[in-house]
Image (cartoon, rainbow, N blue to C red):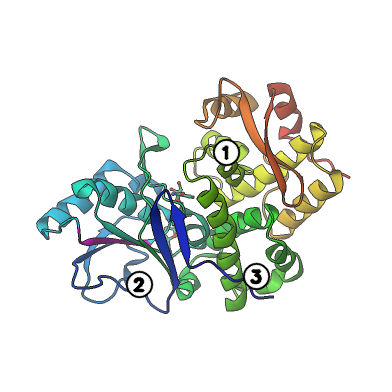
Amino acid sequence: VPIRSRSTLDLGGVTTRIRFVDSISGAVNGEQALFVCDEHTVRYVPHGGETVVLSSGEANKSWDSVSLILEKALERRLGRDDRFVGVGGGVVCDTAAFAASVYMRGARLTLAPTTLLAMVDAALGGKTGIDFHDAKNLVGTFYPAEEVQICLATLCTLSGREYLSGIAEGLKHAFLGEESLYSMFRNERTAVLAREPRCLERIVAGSIEVKGSIVEADPKEGGIRAHLNLGHTFAHALESVTGFCTYTHGEAVAWGIGRASRLGVALGITDRRYAASVIALLADYGYPVSGVRFDADRFLEYMKADKKRKAGEIRFVVQERFGVTRTVTADESAVRSVLFDDSAVE
Ligand SMILES: NC(=O)c1ccc[n+]([C@@H]2O[C@H](COP(=O)([O-])OP(=O)(O)OC[C@H]3O[C@@H](n4cnc5c(N)ncnc54)[C@H](O)[C@@H]3O)[C@@H](O)[C@H]2O)c1
């Protein structure tokens, strides 16, 4: 069953147009465009485009990169009716979008995500930002792109590990309630891993549908948008305690969804058989759902410091079953009890 994807996203009065394209394009109607990319994605910038090439990697989601972009924009005399075009993964998209949002109080913005993670997540929803003093996304704005261009062909140069990192967010969207995506992940693993175009299209379109409807309903994260954090309270703490260099974001999220499933079972919320099937599916895709070890005390410290905590309690997103998701608080001992528990859930 083909998944029909929305072609627009309405966020707090701003409409983002989403287009599947064969190649990335830039300026429209005589505007100037400034492309922002990194050394791995510069090949996808249209020939002759004015370009800022950042160095790749999370360390470059920084003031220095923003400064480079703004300098170039100023040098080219871009006005606020001209366009910034971010061509790259989440690092480039977040940084370019942040720069666009502050340049002359807001220039036009197109995002052309080139990693699966950025197509299904980072380029959608209006969050921009950079890291500051070792804190991820500490400085940022809310600034939805006018346009998101999705060129699936760019995914063919992505490394296997980065591809799987994006698949984890696609799986998360499926668990949140996209039935046909869930069954494709379960029944067509080989085709998914082989990046068959029809699978790519369904993963991206299905994710746009799920993330799109959630962020439209709750643009500023007052309620239901928190569901998109399924697995993320665990994931962020794992990424922090392992210094952001052991696991990709997707690996951490997959581990986190597994741990949230176990926590849900421990709290008497999650259906055991559903939790077991989620964990088995994540393991099938090769994610580290068991055997992950670290300093539990430091992990808990990071978890408590997470900016999503409310009034001193740690909040988690758990599922009762497929498509039924809620936010709960849990005490430290419940979290500790599931951290290293690799026993069978059923
Ligand atoms: N704004 C949001 O709502 C949001 C949501 C999720 C994640 N993020 C952010 O996204 C970032 C992670 O994004 P990511 O996983 O895309 O990582 P990334 O941007 O670091 O890209 C991963 C690597 O793949 C390379 N790359 C990108 N596209 C490629 C292609 N087509 N072919 C070959 N190589 C390519 C990059 O150069 C980089 O080396 C994090 O900073 C995270 O905070 C933001």
Return the mark for residue 66: none
Where is 188 relative to 240, above or below? below
Q: Which residue is mark 3?
A: 192
Tag 1 residue: 223
Q: Residue furthest right?
A: 346
Q: Confirm if mark 3 falls within 8 A of ligand 1.
A: no
Q: At which x and y percent is residue 27?
A: 25, 70
Q: Is residue 49 magenta?
A: no
User: Hey, what amino acid is under mark 1?
Assistant: Gly
Helix, strand or loop under label 3: helix
Q: Tell which residue pokes out farthest to the bottom in this image.
A: 22
Whether residue 295 appears in this view of the structure is no
Please rate how many residues cluster around mark 1, counting C-alpha atoms within 10 Å: few if below 14, some from 14 to 19, many from 20.
some
Ligand 1 quadrant in view: bottom left
The N terminus lies in quadrant: bottom right
Q: Please name the amino acid that badge 2 sits on.
A: Tyr
Name the disc covering residue 44, or none.
Answer: 2
Is 16 on the left or on the right of 203, as rendered?
Answer: left
Horizontal and vertical percent position of residue 35: 26, 64
Q: Give me the C-alpha separation between circle 3 and circle 2.
A: 23 Å
Is ligand 1 within 8 Å of the beta carbon of the residue shown at mark 1? no
Closer to the camera, 162 or 34?
Answer: 34
Q: Residue at x 67, y 58 (%)?
A: 174
For residue 297, what is the image quadrant? top right
Q: Secondary structure at mark 2?
A: helix
**Closer to the camera, 272 or 285?**
272
**In the picture, which quadrant includes the C terminus?**
top right
